[in-house]
Image (cartoon, helix red, strand yellow):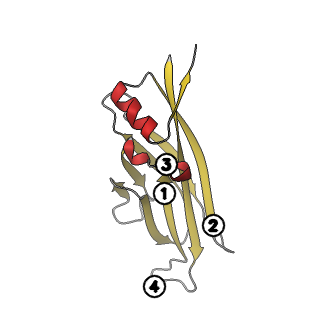
Amino acid sequence: MQCVEVKLELGHRATMRSKPTVEGFTHDWTVFVRGPEGFSIQHFVEKVVFHLHESFPKHKRVIKEPPYQVSESGYAGFNMLIDVHFRNKEEPKKVEFEYDLYLRLEGPVANTRGEKLTFQNPTEEFRKKLLKAGGVRSFHTF
């Protein structure tokens, strides 16, 4: 079975504001999905959907062009779902991640986590897109 492995980075940066906003927001933050080491994931990523906490206006944010990120202000961390949709006519068409956007009272936050995706027997067209974005061929025997 031919497989292609590709890596994603999910992460966020957060800094404390010098003084809270009128709404009481104490932090500015940015959450993102990107390729590692400068690889361009847009070759195989159609869009990224960030599901922010319901208290945000338009809490479902759809980003169709890089950089795949959302910047906001808030006063508390929360868990969010992040859907990465692929430029793939076959399954899988998307993958869902749960991400913990946390804030600190002291100092900034710079958090990144790596995710490895393995596509089994991708179509020739999708395989090319994955390889262009830094994907690596691997062969698995089950």
Residue 7 picture location, percent across and down: 54, 41
What residue is shown at x 35% (from left), y 66% (from top)?
57
Q: Earlier in the sequence, mark 2 or mark 1?
A: 1
Q: Give the number of the disc on residue 39.
A: 3
Point out the frontmost of discs 1 and 4. Answer: 1
Vertical order, 138 against 64 (above or below):
above
Q: Secondary structure at mark 2?
A: strand
CA separation in Å, label 1 and label 4: 26 Å
Looking at the rendered image, the disc whose residue lies closer to the viewer, 3 or 2, is 3
Asked where in the image residue 46 lies, by quadrant, the reply is top left
Q: Mark 1 is on which residue type?
A: Phe
Nearer the observer: mark 1 or 3; the answer is 3
**Distance CA(mark 1)–CA(mark 3):** 14 Å
Mark 1, other Cα within 10 Å: few <14 / some 14–19 / many ≥20: some
Q: Which residue is mark 2?
A: 109
The label number, if any, that marks residue 32 in the structure image: 1
**Mark 4 nearby-residue class (10 Å; few <14, some 14–19, many ≥20):** few
User: Along the polypeptide, which appears first: circle 3 or circle 4?
Assistant: 4
Instruction: Residue under label 4, please give it.
Output: 22
The image quarter in which residue 127 lies: top left
Percent from the top left, x then y, of residue 44? 39, 40
Q: Amino acid at mark 3?
A: Phe
Query: Which residue is drawn at the image coordinates 57% and 69% (left, top)?
Result: 14
> In the displayed structure, would residue 105 be above or below residue 45?
below
Q: Give yes or no for contact between labels 2 and 4 (Cβ–Cβ under 8 Å).
A: no
Q: Quadrant of residue 124?
A: top left
Q: Residue at (65%, 69%) from the top-left corner?
A: 104
Q: Are marks 1 and 4 in contact (CB under 8 Å)?
A: no
